[in-house]
Amino acid sequence: MKVAEVQERIRKLKQENDVCILAHAYQGQEILEVADYVGDSYGLSVLASKAPNKTVIMCGVRFMAETCKVLCPQKTVYLANPLAGCPMADEIDLDLLERLKAEHPGYATVAYINTTSALKTACDVCVTSSSAVQICKALEADKILFVPDPNLGSYVASQVPEKQFAFFDGGCPHHKAMTEADVLEAKAAHPNALLAVHPECPAEVVKHADFVGSTTAIMSFAKESEAREFIVGTEVSIVEHLQFDCPEKSFYPLSTRLTCNDMKATTLMDVLGCLQGIAGEAIELPADVMEGAGRCIRRMIELGE
C-alpha cells in the first residue's frame, strides 16, 4: 500500500468509528496529516477531554496516553504503539522520589508532565515546559523540588530567582546531549539563522538562543517571525513540519542527535492497525493512580490558566 492509500483508509475508519486521533508534534508528517489534533502532550489531553468522540488514539508515548486517560476517564484511550515510552519518564520511580522528598523537607514537589501517572500521585503539581515558570511562581512554597529534568528546572529557577530549587539529575537524553560546540558549529554554518531551543537543553546551549520555549511555542515563533532562517534545538521532526508549513523559509536541526527513537516508533500502519483492532494498547490505570495523578494534573490546570 502507498502512504496516501493508508491515510485515506485511516480517515474513513476514524469517521465510521467515531475516533479522535491525537498526534504529538514529534510524530512524522504522514501521521500529522491524519490527526484531528496536533500539539504538545498537555494540549492534546485537554483537547481530547473536550472532543465529543468516545475513543481516542494517542500517537505519542506512554505518559501522554496516561495523561489523556486521566483527563478523559470515561473514554477509551489507545496508545498506537505500546512500545513507545519515554526515557526521562522512566528515570525516577516512587521509591526514589520518596527518598528525594525526605532529603528535602519543606519543599513542594513539582513534576514535569514527562513523568508516569504513578509518580504524579506523590507530587504537589505537574508542569509543562510552557507553564512551568508561571506555576512555580504561583506556588505558595518558596522551596521547590523539581523532577526529573534539571535543565528545564534550572531554566525555571533562572526565571524565578526569589525561590530556592533542588533538582534530580535526570533529563531528556537527547536534549541534554546538546553542547555549546553544537551551537557554535550550527551558527558558523548558518550565520543568518535564529536559534530556537527547548528549555530541556543545557544552559550552555540556552544562553545562545534567540528564543526559548516549548515545542509548540518554537513552531509558532518560527512561523510568526520575519526571519528567513532558523536553527531548531529540539526533536528533528519539528524541522520537517516547519519545512512543510513555511516552505519559503529555511530550517536546520541543531544536531541530528536530537532524534527520539520512541517518538519514531509509531508508524502510520500502527495507527491503521489500531483502528482495525489489531494493534495498539488500551490504557488502564488503577483507581488510586487515576485519583492521585488527576489531583496533580488538575492543580496544574488551575495554576496555569
Image (spheres, helix red, strand yellow):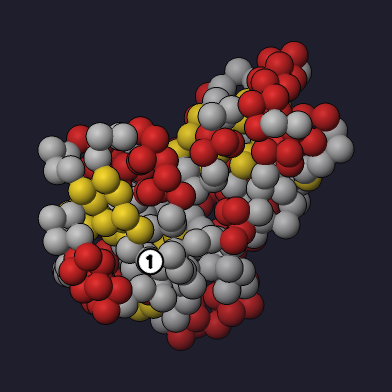
* Number of numbered tags placed on the structure image: 1
Q: Residue at x 73, y 41 (%)?
A: 270
Counting from the top left corner in percent of width and height, residue 35 is at 57, 29
| Residue 39 vs residue 105, the one in the foreground | 39
Q: Judge left or right: residue 96 versus residue 149.
A: right
Residue 183, given in percent of the width and then of the height, sits at 25, 70
Expressed as whole percent of the image width and height from the top left, the position of residue 274 reads 77, 36
Depicted 29 relative to depicted 208: above or below: above
Which one is nearer the viewer's eye here, 97 or 184? 184
* Residue 200 falls in image quadrant: bottom left
The answer to whether residue 134 shows anywhere in this view is: no
Q: Residue at x 64, y 26 (%)?
A: 4
Element type at marker 1?
Answer: loop
Residue 103 seen in the current view: yes
Per the image, the residue denoted by label 1 is: 255
Q: Going 36% across and 73% down the picture, which residue do you hit? A: 178
Find the residue positioned furthest to the bottom: 103
Task: Indicate the quadrant containing the C terminus: top left, top right, bottom left or bottom right.
Answer: top left
Q: Give the vertical position of 206 relative to 58 (above or below).
A: below
Q: Amino acid at mark 1?
A: Ser
Q: Residue at x 79, y 36 (%)?
A: 273
**Quadrant assignment, res 216:** top left
Q: Residue furthest right?
A: 278
